[in-house]
Image: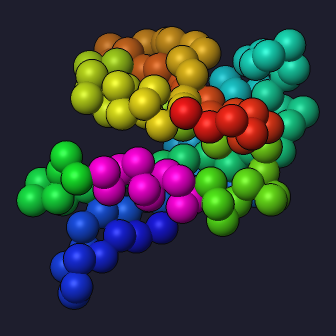
């Protein structure tokens, strides 16, 4: 998903399906972690979800609602196929955590990676038809 201002890339949001779980060795632990989590009394691996990757908004376009619009468009496109969007956000990135919560993500789990970085696993439940 991309946001353009004329010919200028203002922001983008990338994602991957569960089909990638065994294709990128670096991501296998993330998918295994997701398999162990319960969200709203249901194991995550029993629902249809898509994984959010990097979201980036160019500095000149921050504070203009692009982050929110990228995710709203993402939901409009993928909601018919998937029930939830899951992603990980570095806890130290308070701005990103707050932005994800504003859009509708819920913090469901935190962990520390082998390098000492704390991560929040956040889920946006698209079954909730009353988005934030």
Horizontal arrangement in the rendering, residue 17 relative to residue 107 (left or right)? right
Residue 112 % position (x, y) = 43, 13
The total of numbered circles placed on residues is: 0
Residue 15 % position (x, y) = 56, 56
User: What residue occupies the far front of the structure in this picture?
Assistant: 130
- Answer whether residue 54 is visible to the viewer in this image: no
| The C terminus lies in quadrant | top right
- Answer whether residue 39 is visible to the viewer in this image: yes
Q: Note whether 75 is above or below 124 in the view shown.
A: below
The range drawn in magenta is 65-74
**Please, which colouring scheme is shown?**
rainbow
Residue 47 % position (x, y) = 86, 37
Which residue is nearer to you in this view: 90 or 81? 81
The kind of secondary structure the magenta stretch mainly shows is helix
Q: Who's the residue at 24% across and 67% down the image?
A: 10
Q: Who's the residue at 48% across and 67% down the image?
A: 1
Q: Note whether 62 is above or below 115 in the view shown.
A: below
Residue 112 covered by magenta stretch: no
Q: Quadrant of residue 46?
A: top right
Q: Note whether 132 is above or below 82 in the view shown.
A: above
């Amino acid at each position: 998903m991309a946001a353009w201002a004329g010919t200028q890339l203002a922001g983008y949001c990338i994602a991957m399906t569960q089909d990638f779980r065994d294709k990128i060795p670096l991501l296998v632990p993330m998918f295994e972690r997701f398999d162990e989590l319960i969200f709203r009394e249901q194991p995550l691996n029993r629902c249809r979800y898509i994984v959010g990757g990097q979201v980036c908004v160019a500095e000149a376009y921050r504070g203009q609602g692009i982050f929110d619009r990228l995710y709203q468009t993402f939901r409009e496109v993928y909601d018919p196929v998937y029930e939830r969007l899951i992603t990980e956000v570095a806890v130290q990135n308070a701005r990103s955590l707050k932005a994800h919560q504003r859009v509708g993500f819920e913090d469901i789990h935190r962990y520390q990676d082998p390098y000492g970085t704390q991560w929040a696993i956040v889920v946006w439940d698209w079954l909730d038809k009353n988005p934030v």
